[in-house]
Image (cartoon, rainbow, N blue to C red):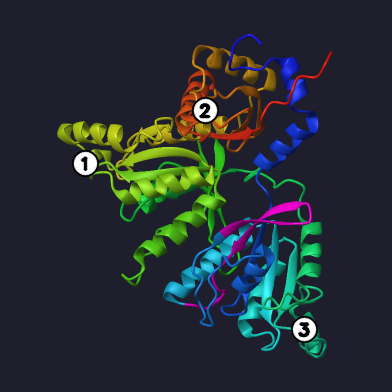
Amino acid sequence: MSDGTWVDESDWEIGYDADEVAEAVAEAETPPVVAVVGRPNVGKSTLVNRILGRREAVVQDVPGVTRDRVSYDASWGDRRFILQDTGGWEPDAKGLQQLVAEQAAVAMRTADVIIFVVDATVGATIADEAAAKILQRSGKPVFLAANKIDNDRAEADAAVLWNLGLGEPHPISAMHGRGVADLLDHVTEALPPVRKPVGGGTGPRRVALVGKPNVGKSSLLNRLAGDQVSVVHDVAGTTVDPVDSLIELGGKTWRFVDTAGLRRKVAHARGHEFYASVRTRGAIDAAEVVIVLIDASQPLSEQDLRIISMVIEAGRALVLAFNKWDLVDEDRRYLLEREIDRELVQVPWAPRVNISAKTGRALQKLVPAMEQALASWDTRIPTSRLNTFLRDVVAATPPPVRGGRQPKIMFATQATTRPPTFVLFTTGFLEAGYRRFLERRLRETFGFEGSPIHINVRVREKRGRRNR
């Protein structure tokens, strides 16, 4: 052992084996997503609670209690997955309920498998039929859960749901658990081994323009799609899906997602924060790189910071675009720099571009910033190089002592990209401050400009040395 904080290769072989590394890497990968969708009050949250085996989702006998998508870690047998509870599906809903339907639509777009819940005692409604048509076009495995079938005599109610065109109805009772295990067996069989990364194909990279109201999102999109560049065409989704615009920029095509929904005005003042959150989160989830627009002429707001945090939590590549630069004078520039130093300390790695959608100032800098962020988002560090780097860092700056013992870092590997996610195998807990230190050193050495980094620590006491 060359120092007190790094375990050499022989110690690693004693402490861990290849299966253990594979298990840790699998845990770090993003599990597939199962979305539970359906009309209000058909029992979606009750089913979610039944699958989780605990009461997590709010359940009331009132339609529309669940307004936002909520995600939970779940498992069945040996399969891990993310379970999403969604708001009620109403294709012709207005106001708040319309936004709930949009959020359910986003869940359907981003999920790997969909459970469509129908109240079998009521039968298929017009809303169910409209949702079924959209689900048929989604290209995702869809399982029709005929809920509220509490006994054998009620199974005839489930049989009539064949006419929805989604295949065999699965009769269940979310309240009592009847048939749920059989449903989950079929669902987990349809899950992909590892979830495909967002935008993992060879098509245009997906970009979201997000920001608080009146920062210039629609002006920027119109400028990019009109005066400065040519629009290839609009790709229309279903009747409730957002429209994605394909725009030629910097010699390549980019897909701007959900921007039309982001710039629609909210009719009701009440619930404004919820409205903004629904549309912003939907755009972020569907994108690979997110351009967060900030009004440079105004002080940074809590809403700006919240949106940036949403991008980081979602693990998307990030570019900060300070818009309305034509309104910024020298005094405002000085204040803005102070605000950035104070408020954006968590994202010094995000590329910053000072633009004006109104005048077209510096818009040509957006493409290099997006390309840089995406390249970082896709970066993978070879295991040998990563461990050599960490060995040097730890030798110079060991982890702090915790509980009278100094943790040892035994091995490290990069589990995934998009975003870069690292797993450190240690003999003890690493303080959050030390993990932030490691992240800074990773960025100093390997770049990662424009991409969040996730560092997972897998703690295990070192095994006793075997006799040789």
The three-letter amino acid code for the residue at tag 3 is Ala
Q: Is residue 33 left or right of residue 17?
A: left
Magenta stretch in the rendered image? 71-93
How many circles with numbers are drawn on the protein? 3
Q: Is residue 43 above or below residue 346?
A: below
Is residue 83 covered in magenta? yes
Alpha carbon of mark 3 to alpha carbon of mark 1: how far? 62 Å
Q: Which residue is mark 2?
A: 448
Q: Determine crowd level at label 3: few under 14, some 14-19, many 20+ residues with C-alpha closer than 10 A.
A: many
The tag earlier along the polypeptide, 2 or 1, is: 1
Residue 261 pos. (x, y %):
46, 61
The three-letter amino acid code for the residue at tag 1 is Leu
Residue 275 pos. (x, y %):
41, 64
Residue 410 pos. (x, y %):
66, 23
- Identify the residue shown where x is 76% and y is 19%: 465
Front residue of 21 and 206: 21
Front residue of 97 and 146: 146
Which quadrant: the C terminus? top right
Residue extending furthest left? 331
Q: Which residue is mark 3?
A: 158
- Identify the residue shown where x is 76% and y is 88%: 157
Q: Is residue 62 left or right of residue 131?
A: left
Q: Is residue 111 above or below residue 55?
A: above
Front residue of 121 and 353: 121
Q: Is residue 7 above or below residue 150?
A: above
